Amino acid sequence: MLLSARISLIKPSPTLAITAKANALRAEGRDVIGFGAGEPDFDTPENIKRAAIKAIEEGFTKYTPVGGTDELKDAIIGKFEKDNGLTYRRPEIVVSCGAKHTLYNLAQVLFEEGDEVLIPSPYWVSYPDIVVLAGGSPVIVRTDVKDGFKLHPDQLKKAITPKTKAIILNSPSNPSGVAYTASELKALGEVILNAGILVISDDIYDKIVYDRFEFANIPSVIPEMKEKTVLVNGVSKTYAMTGWRIGYAAGPEEIIAAVTKIQSQNTSNPTSIAQKASVEAIRGNQDSVSQMVSAFVERRNYIVDALNNIPGVSCIKPEGAFYVFPDVSHYYGTVFKGREIKGSADISSYFLDEVNVAVVPGGEFGHDGHIRLSYATSMKNIQEGIRRLSGALLELKK
């Protein structure tokens, strides 16, 4: 056996796999509409691209400090001060190659065998595997659509054991788009504070919120939690910079130093050019963000209404991010041309095979009764994709 046992504990990212399959089918000439991608369909704003070009022209193409440049760290510090009222110092900031890389590094320095990490479901597909690769044990705490897919304090209290090391919170959420209010976070934070566990707060969608929702995170509502919380963010979603691979974390100096240490032995510094572009993204004109969010609002409203108009389908309205997570379990147990639909994997394969629509099975997020659709695509694609899905569902027979 050439490979380690460790690699058998995880699987490839299902969201990336769905997107790759949709792209391969398009290359074969099939008219596939993809709802799988977790990235904005907008281009990176011009001012950010110009900053990158300038960096190249000025020769900013060498190694930088492992944990990021002081210029970018200062921009990130300014963002936290302005957006969250939180004060950090440079030693409390680390910049990595995307938020996923940041989360992976954090797991490597925080978790080991015997550590339990609470993950409310539905969850981003990579959280459990990132914990497993570090030797920890992911403990899934299931939330219910009747509660808006939100974790309640009593539920959290019951899930905490002497082995619990941390909880991963993601608000707004991928895949549901649900976001916690300040009061809801305060109630959870009080339980967490009393238990003495760590919080990893994945805030990557903090700027993509709707209907005047006010974003908050644990340390912004409970200042005492600042020393027990690591905030994770990046430029990928807010500034349509998914390919630039810049993520970052803010937290206790000891943890940030450890992340920097482990990063020095894997990737070293994030790309120098992308760091310069990220400074401009954070400090520069923010009009592109509001324009993107306005487009997402229109798409969200359309897709939620359209899904809820399909018999047997129900979908809550997201408060942020750019996903919907409809319940399609009404159609489980149905048959199409001898093909039985038993769960989210079956219905997702059916959609792709029969009507050329790519969605992500909800089972990958811990809720098999659902599927995830990204509305980070054109309104034209959304309208045609929903038309196809609706027609395909009506073909299914009990």
Image (cartoon, rainbow, N blue to C red):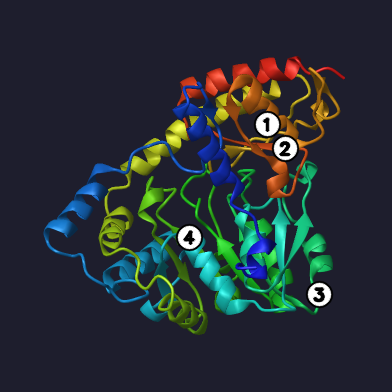
Of badges 3 and 2, nearer the viewer stands 2
Quarter of the figure with residue 397: top right
The secondary element bearing badge 4 is classed as: helix
Q: Amino acid at mark 2?
A: Ala
Q: Residue at x 49, y 82 (%)?
A: 258
Horizontal relation, residue 335 to residue 109: left or right: right
Tag 1 and tag 2, C-beta contact below 8 Å? yes
Q: Residue at x 30, y 76 (%)?
A: 65
Please state, as top left, top right, bottom left or bottom right, where the C terminus lies in the image. top right
Please state, as top left, top right, bottom left or bottom right, where the N terminus lies in the image. bottom right
The secondary element bearing badge 1 is classed as: helix
Going from N to C along the chain, the mark reached first, 2 or 4, is: 4
Which mark, residue 6? none
Q: Position of residue 140 (x, y in %)?
A: 76, 59
Distance Cα–Cα, label 3 vs label 2: 33 Å
Q: Residues within 10 Å of mark 2 (few under 14, many from 20)?
A: some
Q: Amino acid at mark 3?
A: Thr
Horizontal relation, residue 344 to residue 85: left or right: right
Residue located beneath label 3 in the image: 161
Vertical placement of 219 versus 23: above or below?
Answer: below
Q: Position of residue 10 (x, y in %)?
A: 66, 60
Q: Nearer the viewer, residue 88 or 355?
A: 355
Q: Nearer the viewer, residue 356 or 29?
A: 29
Distance Cα–Cα, label 4 vs label 1: 29 Å
Horizontal relation, residue 212 to residue 154: left or right: left
Q: Position of residue 157 (x, y in %)?
A: 80, 68
Residue located beneath label 4 in the image: 99
Going from N to C along the chain, the mark reached first, 3 or 4, is: 4
Q: Amino acid at mark 4?
A: Ala
Q: Residue at x 58, y 50 (%)?
A: 172
